[in-house]
Structure formats: structure tokens, C-alpha cells
Amino acid sequence: MTTPEPNEFEAKAATEAGTGIIAEILDMLKANKKWWMIPLFLVFLLFGLLMLLSGTGMAPFIYSLF
């Protein structure tokens, strides 16, 4: 049994360097003109940062913010 030849899309995708998640999100926002989603992503990033810092020695200082 032989393997099928890769089509043009697969060949190009295999040779391209992968882009990062931030670049992918920015490309999606630019292509779809969804600029209103930027504040949403920023809030998600801030909450993620807050969760990361809550497990460190910064927890008492974060608690006092709220």
C-alpha cells in the first residue's frame, strides 16, 4: 500500500514555520475586523496573570486590591 502524495496545501503547510498564538489571534482580528474583541482578550490575560500570581508570594498583595 502506497502513501498518497501530499496536495499543495499540505506541502506548503509542512514547509512553513509555525506562527505563535498571539500572531494567529492578531491575524484573525485583522482579517475579520473584530477589533472589539481586544478588550476581551486583555481581560482574559489579566485574569490569567492574577491566577498565576495568586499561587505565589504575591497573594497577600493581590488580596488587598479587592
Image (cartoon, rainbow, N blue to C red):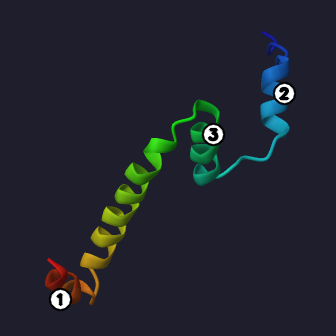
Q: Secondary structure at mark 2?
A: helix
Q: Is residue 51 above or below residue 44?
A: below
Residue 5 at what x, y percent from top left?
Answer: 85, 15
Count of numbered tags:
3
Could you tell which of marks 1 and 2 lies nearer the N-terminus?
2
Q: Residues within 10 Å of mark 2 (few under 14, many from 20)?
A: few
Residue identifier under label 1: 60
> Which label sits on residue 11?
2
Q: Secondary structure at mark 1?
A: helix
Q: Amino acid at mark 3?
A: Lys
Residue identifier under label 3: 30
- Is mark 1 in CB contact (under 8 Å) with mark 2? no
In percent of the image, x 78 and y 33: which residue is there? 13
User: Between marks 3 and 2, how big is the CA–CA gap?
Assistant: 26 Å
Q: In the visual, does 12 lie left or right of 62?
A: right
- Is mark 1 in CB contact (under 8 Å) with mark 3? no
In percent of the image, x 18 and y 88: which residue is there? 60
Q: In the visual, does 44 lie left or right of 3?
A: left
Q: Amino acid at mark 1?
A: Pro
Q: Is residue 36 above or below residue 59?
A: above
User: Between marks 1 and 3, how big is the CA–CA gap?
Assistant: 39 Å
User: Between marks 1 and 2, how big is the CA–CA gap?
Assistant: 52 Å
Q: Is residue 22 above or below residue 65?
A: above
